[in-house]
Amino acid sequence: VIDVNLMGVFNVTQSALKECMLSKKDGVIINISSVWGMAGASCEVAYSASKAGVIGLTKGLAKELAKSNITVNAIAPGAIATDMIYKEYTEEEIKEIENEIPMGRLGTPIEIANLALYLASDNARYITGQVISPNGGMVI
């Protein structure tokens, strides 16, 4: 889990930086963490640790790369309505999850995609080192 979730992000980022971003002194890096990287999850220690590592990587890289005009941010989604959640949980369990979310529903993949598009746009060029967590108020 740590190799994929943390080292995978580290390795891809290092490659992108070396291949194009550093020489151009321009770029946008958007890492995907998790709400559990911010708050920790019982029975999900390795997952939580790997996603917390992505947050640390994001913040450290943002400081290092700011002078190179490269922004680095992380999206840390909460419960999102994907095939995975529908395969892993029963309808009753999903209702229980929704009841724990102040907004009363799961997020949608398009909501995460729209946030990524915004962070990749010129409108977000002054945003770096941030962890934005679309989670319906589950973790504040």
Image (tube, helix red, strand yellow):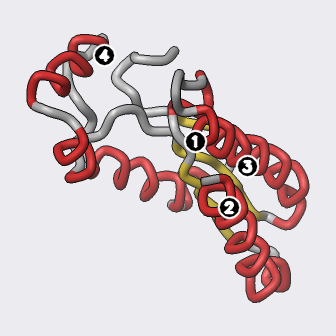
Query: Which of the two labelled residues, at mark 3 and mark 1, occupies the earlier sequence position?
Result: 1
The residue sitting at 82% across, 54% down in the picture is 61
Find residue 101 and name its label.
Answer: 4
Query: Which of the two labelled residues, at mark 3 and mark 2, occupies the earlier sequence position?
Result: 2
The reply to whether discs 3 and 2 touch (Cβ–Cβ < 8 Å) is no
**Pointer 1: what residue?**
47
In this rendering, the answer to whether 21 lies above or below 29 is below
Classify residue 52 by image quadrant. Answer: top right
Residue 103, image x, y percentages: 25, 16
**Pointer 3: what residue?**
58
Q: Which of the two discs, 3 and 2, sits closer to the camera?
A: 2
Mark 3: secondary structure = helix
Q: Nearer the viewer, residue 79 or 116?
A: 79
How crowded pointer 2 is (Cα within 10 Å; few <14, some 14-19, many 20+) is rated as few
Q: Nearer the viewer, residue 13 or 111?
A: 13
Residue 98, image x, y percentages: 22, 20
The residue sitting at 62% across, 37% down in the picture is 131
Left or right: residue 114 versus residue 42 is left
In this rendering, the answer to whether 22 lies above or below 41 is below
How crowded pointer 4 is (Cα within 10 Å; few <14, some 14-19, many 20+) is rated as some
Mark 1: secondary structure = helix
Q: Nearer the viewer, residue 68 or 45?
A: 45
Left or right: residue 11 versus residue 133 is right
Left or right: residue 34 versus residue 6 is left
What's the amino acid at mark 1? Tyr
In this rendering, the answer to whether 92 lies above or below 89 is above
**Pointer 2: what residue?**
3
The reply to whether discs 1 and 2 touch (Cβ–Cβ < 8 Å) is no
Q: In the orientation shown, which residue stands out farthest toward the left?
A: 91
Whether residue 67 appears in this view of the structure is: yes
Query: Which of the two labelled residues, at mark 4 and mark 3, occupies the earlier sequence position?
Result: 3
Q: Nearer the viewer, residue 74 or 44?
A: 44
